[in-house]
């Protein structure tokens, strides 16, 4: 399990405008082989929730993700399949309509 929460106050040096950014995430992973020894130890299932309010426009961004990882050599060589539902909610629909959508991703990460 891993999480992060942040709150930032940013002052624009040109305009003097102050903005307050709030956000964070919570994610967790689980290796099914921990409970079922017949399953491969290289396989991990993971979930993530993230939220950010950038205070640039009346928008809030939310992400819900499910992922499956296969570790060939730890985090130095892994394959990730991920499905994320992304939501941008606006309090000013006329200027910034709500945007919802799915992101599907397949990523092979190699570190040398």
Image (cartoon, rainbow, N blue to C red):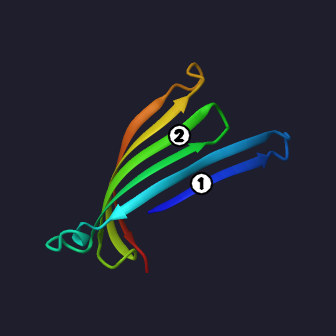
Q: Nearer the viewer, residue 31 or 76?
A: 31
Tell me residue 77's x, y (percent): 35, 75
Q: Residue furthest top?
A: 94
Q: Which quarter of the figure has residue 41? A: bottom left
Q: Secondary structure at mark 2?
A: strand
Closer to the camera in the image, 16 or 27: 27
Q: In this picture, is 24 found above or below 19?
A: below
Q: Residue furthest front?
A: 35
In the picture provided, is 56 more to the left or to the right than 66? right
Residue drawn at the location 48% of the way across and 62% of the way down:
2
**Which residue of the protein is positioned furthest toward the left in this rendering?**
38
The quarter of the image holding the N terminus is bottom left
Residue under the point 59% across and 48% down: 23
**Label 2 Cα crowd, 10 Å radius (few <14 / some 14-19 / many 20+):** some
Name the image quarter holding residue 63. top left
Label 1 with label 2: CB-CB less than 8 Å: no
Count neighbours of disc 1 (C-alpha within 10 A) and say few if under 14, some if 14 to 19, many if 20 or more.
few
Image position, residue 68 (x, y; %): 29, 60
Indicate the quadrant where residue 85 lies. Answer: top left
Residue beneath disc 2 = 61
- The mark lying in front, picked from 1 and 2, is 1
94 in relation to 84, above or below: above
Tell me which numbered mark, 1 or 2, is placed earlier along the sequence. 1
Q: Which residue is mark 1?
A: 5
Asked if residue 28 is positioned above or below residue 109 in the image, the reply reads above
Q: Give the position of the C terminus as an image quadrant.
A: bottom left
Residue displayed at 49% across by 48% down: 50
Label 1 and label 2: CA atoms lie apart by: 14 Å
Residue positioned 85% across, 47% down in the render: 13
Query: Regarding mark 1 in the picture, which secondary structure is present there?
Result: strand
Q: Residue 42 location, x and y as percent?
A: 26, 73
Answer with left or right where residue 24 lies relative to residue 15: left
């Amino acid at each position: 399990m891993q999480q992060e929460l942040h709150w930032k106050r940013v002052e624009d040096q040109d305009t003097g405008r102050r903005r307050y950014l709030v956000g964070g995430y919570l994610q967790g992973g689980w290796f099914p082989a921990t409970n079922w020894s017949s399953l491969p130890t290289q396989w991990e299932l993971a979930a993530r929730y993230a939220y950010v309010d950038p205070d640039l426009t009346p928008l809030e961004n939310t992400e819900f993700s499910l992922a499956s990882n296969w570790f060939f050599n730890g985090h130095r060589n892994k394959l990730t399949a991920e499905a994320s539902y992304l939501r941008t909610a606006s309090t000013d629909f006329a200027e910034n309509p709500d945007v919802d959508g799915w992101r599907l991703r397949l990523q092979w990460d190699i570190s040398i």
